[in-house]
Structures are given as C-alpha cells and as structure tokens.
Image (cartoon, grey):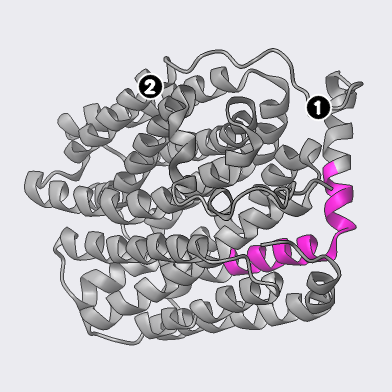
Amino acid sequence: MTGPVPLPESVPDTARRDPWRFVRPLSHRDFRMLFGAVVLSIFGAGMWAVVMVYTVIGAGGGPIELSLVAAANAVGRLACAIPGGIAADRLPRRLILRVVELLNLLAITSVAVAGAFGAVTIPHLTIVAFVLGAGAGFFYPAYSAILPRILPPTQLLAANGLEGAVRPALQQAAGPAAAGVIVAAVLAPAHAAWGIVAAHALALVLLLFVRPEPPADTDAPSEAPEGVRGVLHDLREAVGFTVRTPWLLWTLLFATGWVLVFLGPEEVLLPFVTRERIGEDPRLFGFLLAIYGVGGVLGSIVVSSLKLPRRYLTVMMGVWGVSTLPFAVVGITHEYWLMAVCLFLVGFGFSYGNVIWGTLLQRRVPRHMLGRISSLDFFVSLALMPLSMALAGPLAAVVPIEAIFIAAGVIPLILGTIAYLVARMPKDELAHPLDH
C-alpha cells in the first residue's frame, strides 16, 4: 500500500498548512496545457448535454429516441473503459489524449455541418454519441495515468481536486447554461454545436503543446508481462485486488445500482418533466443543470477544505445515500424553485462523496495498479448505465413519472446501507486509519 509521508516534526506548521496547495499544480507548464484542454473538453461536454437533447427533439424524437442516443453514449463509455485503462498503461498517454480530442472534434463538427443543411437524423446522433462515449473511456484513464508523470507526488491530490471542482462547474453548470442560451437564440439546436466545435478545437491545440513524458516509469513493475498475456495478467490482478477488498468491491456494487436507478431518470426524463411542468424554454432546463453543477462545485470545495473524516467510509456512504432523497421531490413538485433546490442538494452530496472516494483510491490502492483500478471503477460503476438510459423512456410510458423519481431517490439509500453493513465498513475504517 502507498501512503503519505508525514512531515518531520521540525517542519513549521505553515508548511503543513499551505493555503495555496489547491492551485500548486498550475505552476507546471505541462499541467497547465493539459488542464486547459480538460477544462475545454468538459465545457464542450456540458454544452452537448443540452444541445443533444434539443437536437433529438428537433429531429422529431421523443423520450424513446432520446433514450437511444443517451444509451449509445453510455455503451461507448462502457465498451472502452477497460481497454482505455490498459491502453493508458501501454501507449503514450499524450498520443491517446490527442487522438481522442481529434475524434471528438470530427464527431461534433459532423453534427454542426448536418445541422446547417437541416439533415440531422437520430441514427447520426446515435453514432456521434457512441463516439463521444468511447472517447471518454480512453481519455480519462490516460489523463489519470499521465498526472504522476508530469507532477510531483505531493501535488497529485490537489490536481485531482482541481478537476473535481471544475467538472461540475463546467459540465453541469456553465456548459449547459451557455448551451441553453445559444439554443434559445439560434432556434436550430444543431447550430449551437459550433460552440462545442470551438471548445474541442482549442483543447486539441493545447494538447499539442504538452511535451513528451520522461522515458522512465519508476512506479511500474520491473518485469511487466507483454502482449495479450500481459493484458490478461493486468486485468486479473486488478480484478483480484478488487474482489479481495470488501470496501472497494461493495462501493463499486453500490455505484452500479445507483447508476441503474438514478441516471436514466436524470438524463432522459428530467428534460421532459421540465418542459411539461415548467415550460418549453431551453434555458429553464439548462439552468436546472447549472444549479445541479453549482451544488457539485460547492460540495467539492467544502469537503476539500476539511480534514479527511476519521470515519471516512461512514461519511462517504452516508452522504451518497442521503443526498439522493431530494431527487424524489423533483418528480413530484411543479415548483421550479423547489426543483432547483433539490437538484442543488443532490449535486452537493454527490460531489462531496466523490472527493472522498477519489482520495481513498489514491491512499488505499497500491500505486502500481491505480490506473487499472480506476478504469475498473469506471467500468463497474457504469455497467448498467446503458440499461438505465434505454429503460427510462419506455418505463415512463407505463409507470407514473412520480413513482420513477421516488424510486430513484430512495433506492440508493437502501443500497448504500446494505453495502455499508455487508462490507463491514465501520470496522474497516477503524482498522485502516488515514492521517488527515
């Protein structure tokens, strides 16, 4: 196991409490280029969340067609999660990031061009969604794997904290809000895709300025197996460690169940609930996603400003379970302000728990397999995402929307309680204390 090296007793307390630690990674040129590209890519993804919805509607689609497009994105992520993690350990990370960003650029450009001629179709959007999902499956394992190669170990947590705060701010707040305004202004939703094209083009340019990694990989095993046998060995090692680690295994199982019951209603049904109960103005839905993202930003900032809880697993599972309860209210109320407050609380709790989770992976997973465990986490957590997306639309045709949202809000608390007890997390966290 890897862990932090405590500062000597002689080190002044001011060194222990660096008020600028959160932004220290930005002092490194390559990280600035890489992080700038990630910021632009995330912003583009946030815009796509709204543009995709209204482009599907503009192409004559409804809940079922939106389910199809959303599910294609999820299938792409899921199919490439494990290959993406293995590739990140075996290929130049910089090359992977550039290729993914180029494919993202080409995919979104095809939507913008087709929109200019009024030729956007549901099959076209489905293919684009799959490509974007597949790219995410390769991009983020490579991003995670390149950080230890361009930053000192003491700044990795701060770098992850920056990404954790920026992601909801852009993907769920600024991106959707900007897209909602643009879609409302240009009327043709596909025309707003040009804004996403610009974001991905700038991201690709920044990635071209990231310098080659140092040739030495000091944290890799000295005799790593190669070829197909090596890939299978890598995968078996990661799976074996996960199965033998109850807190890790049951947290991933909880995440799988959470994705199944929550993401479909959030991604597929929430836009239609907003249109039917509040109004058809795209800005209404965009600002709801923005408020959800603001909650995520504040959740990340708050938990990052506090010491890691002594009962870290208890706090993480408790926050995750309780924070989904307000989502049940979203499916019942017709009040816009109440929907906004509830989504803010959901976003706050989700990000709060995620920051603790990311820290635990870094603190309690052996460093030499952290990349594979991260990609396995990505894969297992999203295993049922395509099914959730695909079922949400058809289910809404036979089950009251209110019942679906109540289930999505309550079931995660039940699943979290089961995971917490079966994995004996209270005993585990006391047996493995982490310094703050």
The span shown in magenta is: 238-259
Label 1 neighbour load within 10 Å: few <14, some 14-19, many 20+:
few
Q: Given the image, on which type of amino acid does mark 2 rest?
A: Leu
Q: Which mark is residue 206?
A: 2
Foreground residue among 187 and 369: 369
Number of on-image labels: 2
Residue 307 placement: quadrant? bottom right
Quarter of the view holding residue 398: bottom left
Asked which secondary structure carries label 1, the reply is: loop
Q: Which is more N-terminal, label 1 or label 2?
A: 2
Q: Position of residue 286 (x, y in %)?
A: 24, 59
Magenta stretch: includes residue 117: no
Task: Give the SS element for disc 2.
Answer: helix
Residue 220 appearing in the image: yes
Between 67 and 82, the one lying in front of the other is 82
Task: Give the residue at x 46% y 60%.
Answer: 300
Which residue is under mark 1? Answer: 220
Q: Position of residue 374 (x, y in %)?
A: 68, 45
Q: Amino acid at mark 1?
A: Ala
Asked if the residues shown at circle 2 and circle 1 are in contact, with their CB atoms under 8 angstroms apart, the answer is: no
304 left or right, relative to 427 = left
Q: CA distance from mark 2 to mark 1?
A: 28 Å
- Looking at this view, is 58 or 25 the one in front? 25
Classified by dominant secondary structure, the portion drawn in magenta counts as helix
